[in-house]
Amino acid sequence: MKDPEGGKTPPQRGGGDDSGGSESETPRPTSRRGRRRHRSRGKRGKNPQGQTIEASSPAPQSAPNANNVPSQDGDKTDVVEQPRRRRSRRRRRRKAVFAKDHTVPANAAAPDVAAGGGASSGSASSPDQAMQTQPADHVRSRPVETKDGGNTIRPEPDGRAGNRQEPRRWRSRQFRREGHAPLYAALDLGTNNCRLLMAAPTRPGQFRVVDAFSRIVRLGEGLTHSGRLSDAAMDRAVDALHVCAGKLMARKTRGYRLIATEACRAAENGAAFIERVRRETGLSLEIVDRETEARLAVAGCSSLVEPKTRGVVLFDIGGGSSEIALIDIPDGDPRRLSEKIVSWTSLPMGVVTLAEHFGGRDVTPAVFEAMVAHVSEVIGRFDGRMDLAHLLDNPNFHLLGTSGTVTTLAGIFLDLERYDRRRVDGIWMSSEQVSAMTERLLGWTFEERVDNPCIGADRADLVLAGCAILEAIRRTWPSERLRVADRGLREGILIELMTRDNAWRRSRRKGGQQ
């Protein structure tokens, strides 16, 4: 029989059966769960000093009146007090268990915390105020999701609610496995952006993003004319790297790689800038060559190449350089894609350098064609450009682009009110759709490009230069299909780090033991 509050009726200590009801005669359980429940039940008849309390029947109480009114003698009737009963603490997989009665579960919203924008005048409007609605320390509960205005405040991925960590034994098996997965970090300091990605391995070949950071720093601004990194550009980059250093220090990582690309490769003071970064932020950046950059881009986008694909031209349009890799897949197996590169090149131009050379603010159709002709001339010097000529008419051949240019075109094609990576990454676009989006951008003024949510003020003067590089690639390797990838060097670094460290095998072994 269950009690009205949902717990089980506690066992009778006295002689309620033929055996006499002696507690010492109860057989001791053999399982760990049974022993834990046996000990918890045995403590109910002891006081805080550990002395045994004899069970006694409650004192007789006078029956109350129907309306609980004073009796004729002038005394109020006594109210029968129901004994408090505790719930049995049974551990159930993937279910919340509360240790005591009369406690509010953590996932039940407090009266003064409103969901969404309907908060009252006394509602919690800051994370500190929202944390005051958490249960006391003696209540074992699950993390709470509250809302700060319109922003949802969620617990940290490691299971912390506020500053208090939930006891390990109350976590589910899946949550515990993800919380103990090793973290890996990848930082890419390019000509235009500074990006950081931190992730933990999950399924073989996949990972779960734990933290990410991206900021436009334009490190290569003015590099084409002066050949040096300007002081203002270096200051912007150092400020962004300070943020990255704080994120790396806040979490324990098993492995990381921090790279710098074309801007630091081409600048005369690139080595001095790397030393300044090490001195001021503590980060040791590695200037990688163009071949390594192309290999990392291929590794990061390998999961978007479908089986039965026969050939791919993968390109990464950067700020100071553009990497192109020709991949031949005769067996149609996209695994180990970086080992199937037949030829590659790195164009010494990107969206920043091309926009500075031709102008990126007011681009007419004539200026755009001049950009395309200039890029096509540079691609024409690439000796291996015809290595996939036998696959250009194959329906299983396509282009794969990873850059801000192609993701911007995809966002405009989808008419996104706000850029959404989940909808853009992996989308297919036909040749006619790419041409239509390029013509649409050419018809916009600079102010119209700024107002578009997928472009913004930071990319308004660079997007048409990227479209010119894309158009030159499409004319050299014509294809009916283009796949868009919102991923690149950072993902390639993480995959190489996890593969070298056997992270997926280790996570499977740990997951099987838990």
Image (cartoon, rainbow, N blue to C red):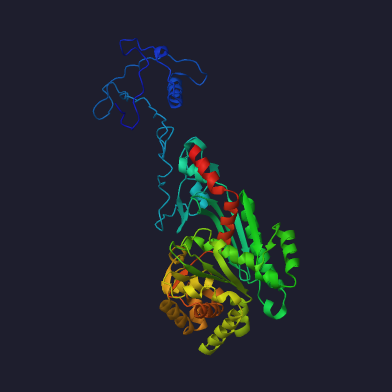
Q: Position of residue 219 (x, y in %)?
A: 66, 71
Outermost left residue: 66
Number of callouts: 0
Q: Nearer the viewer, residue 374 or 436?
A: 374
Q: Is residue 436 visible?
A: yes
Residue at 44% from the left image edge and 27% from the top image edge: 33
Please tell me in which quadrant of the rendered image residue 396 appears: bottom left
Q: Position of residue 37 (x, y in %)?
A: 43, 25
Q: In this view, does 213 lie above or below 268?
A: above
Question: Where does the N terminus fall, quadrant-wise?
Answer: top left
- Name the side, left or right, on which 150 lies relative to 75: right
Q: Can residue 514 be seen in this view?
A: no
Residue at 39% from the left image edge and 57% from the top image edge: 118
Please tell me in which quadrant of the rendered image residue 410 appears: bottom left
Q: Nearer the viewer, residue 303 or 112?
A: 303
Q: Where is residue 315 in the image (x, y as percent from the top left)?
A: 54, 71
Q: Is residue 43 above or below residue 22?
A: below
Residue at 40% from the left image edge and 15% from the top image edge: 26
Q: Nearer the viewer, residue 209 or 279?
A: 209
Q: Position of residue 246 (x, y in %)?
A: 64, 55
Outermost bottom residue: 366
